[in-house]
Image (spheres, helix red, strand yellow):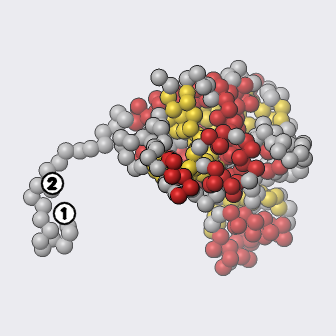
Amino acid sequence: MKKRVAVFFGGKSPEHEVSVITGLQAIENIDRDAFDVLPIYVSKDGRWFSGPELLKVETYRNLGLIPQKTIQEAVIPSDTQKNLLPIVKSSLNPFKKSETPTIDVILPTFHGGIGESGSFQGMFDIMNIPYVGPSVLGGALSMDKVVMKQLFLQNNLPITKYLWFYRNDFVENRLNIVQTIETKLKYPLFVKPANGGSSIGTTKAHNRKELENAIEVANVFDKRFIVEESFEDSREINISVIGNSGSIIETSVCEEVFSSGEVLTYEDKYVGGSKKIGSSKGMASTQRKIPADLPKKVIIELEQLAKKAFSILESSGVARVDFLVNKTTNEIVILEINNPPGSLAYYLWEASGISFKKLLTKLIEFAIVRYEDDRKNTVTFSSNILHNYQTSGSKGKV
């Protein structure tokens, strides 16, 4: 029998629209001979919706109208009921006794926000349903640039020099923080929200005024910000990784991506050279060269570093690892890991001989394998400590 795959997308995130594109791309390319698809749209205020209208790209021209065309769903925190529960409203009386079909596997395509940070993964664990992508821990580690950098540093991966601060500290000690940055780091600098993606809130600063402005921008999107030295005269090289940490993992071909300025912007990534409304193809819109023109020795090193980063961060499913490579010396630094990447990095896997349809099938299979592996863990422990337990005079102490 076919397995039913629930594709989750949207969410409370600045990357909401990007997630919608990735979700629709996944829905369009899932092997329908092997899987049935259930689209689950998560609105910007966190509500969950399902229904056939979500399969139509036209539905997303006006996000505000989606609740009128779909069924709002609620999660059932149960080990046995692997589905969602429709929330009945007067306008949806025909669905009063209906239930969302059983879900066999979840494919989250969230970018940023609580969808990528591990929060939804915790919900999926409670629902006891296999899901594509990292665990709660893996999602959190991959999302937080500060913790990610610290883990990279501890595991001897090459990174640029950086500092990080809390937004509140900057508000209270603005001058001291700016002076600390200028003492320990050299311009030009990149300032980013600690938790963010798609280059939203990322700015390059060449002097103090630009630095302060960049910090103000980053602080709009997160309570912490990170400041990194720029790795000048470099090429941005990305590579994708698939698999489960602790098991066999594979790498794709490398790509070189090109920006229109000093920062690879949101528009560079999702609009490319086109200004036409509705022309975005997700990350496939980025100006890029695949495969990147690199010496074999550099490619091997990038593959090894990408696999190591994937494993260090407890990643699963598909990720894209971003690097900078010096144009003259080929020195490498790792920037970050994106799990999941925009458009699930399908374009890198197509160039590696794996179609989008086959990639999605592999990701679903990875999810099931990891789920079955996790089920081997003992989650109960027989004990008789409650047999003679009494609260009288104990003040609640065991």
Residue at the disc numbered 1: 398
> Of 11 and 72, which appears nearest the observer?
72
Q: Which of the 4 image quarters holds residue 45?
A: bottom right
Amino acid type at circle 1 is Val
Q: Position of residue 354 (x, y in %)?
A: 68, 22
- The numbered mark, 1 or 2, whose residue comes first in the sequence reads 2
Question: From the viewer's perspective, is 26 left or right of 395?
Answer: right
User: Is residue 374 placed above or below 66 in the rendered structure?
Assistant: above
Q: Label 2 neighbourhood size at 10 Å, few (<14), some (14-19), many (20+)?
A: few
Res 371 seen here: yes
Q: Where, quadrant-wise, is the C terminus in this rendering?
A: bottom left
Image disc number at residue 385: 2
Q: Which of the 4 image quarters holds residue 134?
A: top right
Q: How many marks?
A: 2
Q: Position of residue 83 (x, y in %)?
A: 45, 42
Taking the spot 59% from the left edge, 41% from the top edge, the residue there is 39
Question: From the viewer's perspective, is 371 left or right of 218?
Answer: left
Q: Label 1 neighbourhood size at 10 Å, few (<14), some (14-19), many (20+)?
A: few
> Of 70 and 305, which appears nearest the observer?
70
Question: From the viewer's perspective, is 263 left or right of 339?
Answer: right
Taking the spot 72% from the left edge, 58% from the top edge, the residue there is 192
Res 246 seen here: no
Taking the spot 20% from the left edge, 67% from the top edge, the residue there is 397
Taking the spot 81% from the left edge, 42% from the top edge, the residue there is 280
Instruction: Say what secondary structure mark 2 lies in.
Output: loop
Contact between labelled residues 2 and 1, with CB atoms less than 8 Å apart: yes
Amino acid type at circle 2 is Ile
The outermost residue toward the bottom is 172
Q: Which of the 4 image quarters holds residue 376?
A: top left
Q: Position of residue 163 (x, y in %)?
A: 67, 61
